[in-house]
Image (cartoon, helix red, strand yellow):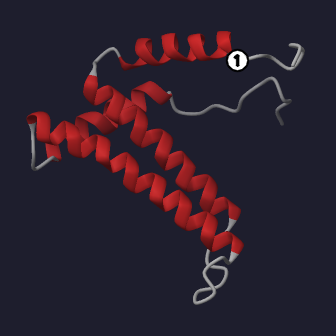
Amino acid sequence: MTDQHSRPSSPDVWSSVDALWTWLDGEQPHGGREGLLLRVLKLSEEVGEVAQAVIGVTGQNPRKGVTHTWEDVQGELCDVVITALVALRTLTPDAREVFDRHLEKVTERSPGPSAPR
C-alpha cells in the first residue's frame, strides 16, 4: 500500500520514450523533415481521440449514446502525453533536459495553492 507521497514502482518514462522512439524511427516509412512533421501530426490524431472519448463518455452523440468510460479518457490522455514526449525526442536527443527545463519554467510562473489570487 502506498501513501500519497510515495509512488508504486513504474517503468522509467524516459527509457520507455527512448525505446518507443527507436522502434518508431526504425519503422517509419518517411524520414527526414517529412517524418518529423508526420510524427508531430500524430499528436493531433491522439488529441482527437481524447475528444471522441469525452463525447462518448458523456453521450453527446445521440446516434451512438454512451460509448466510452472515464478510464477510456484517461488512457487517451496518456496516449497524448506519450506521443508528445516521443515527438519531443524526435526533435532532440536532449528531450528529458528540454522537458525538465520547460516544466521548471512553467512551475515557477504558475501560482501555487498559497499564492494570492
Identified at 82% across, 32% down, the residue is: 2
Task: Name the side, left or right, on which 40 lies relative to 67.
Answer: left
Element at label 1: loop
The part of the image, by quadrant, that contains residue 16 is top left
Badge 1 local density, few (<14 within 10 Å), some, or many (20+)?
few
Residue 91 at x, y percent in the picture: 27, 25
Count of marks placed on residues? 1
Q: Residue at x 49, y 29 (%)?
A: 13
- Position of 89 relative to 101 (above/below): below
What residue is drawn where x is 22% and y is 46%? 38
Asked whether, in this view, residue 90 is left or right of residue 29, the answer is right
Question: Is residue 81 or residue 113 the one in the foreground?
Answer: 113
| Residue type at numbered disc 1 | Ser
Question: What residue lies at 68% left-to-right and 78% top-to-bottom?
Answer: 59
Q: Residue 31, how many percent across, how many down?
A: 9, 39
Location of residue 94 in the rendering, given as x and y in whole percent from the top left corner: 33, 14
Which residue does the numbered mark 1 point to in the structure image?
A: 110
Residue 87 position by quadrant = top left
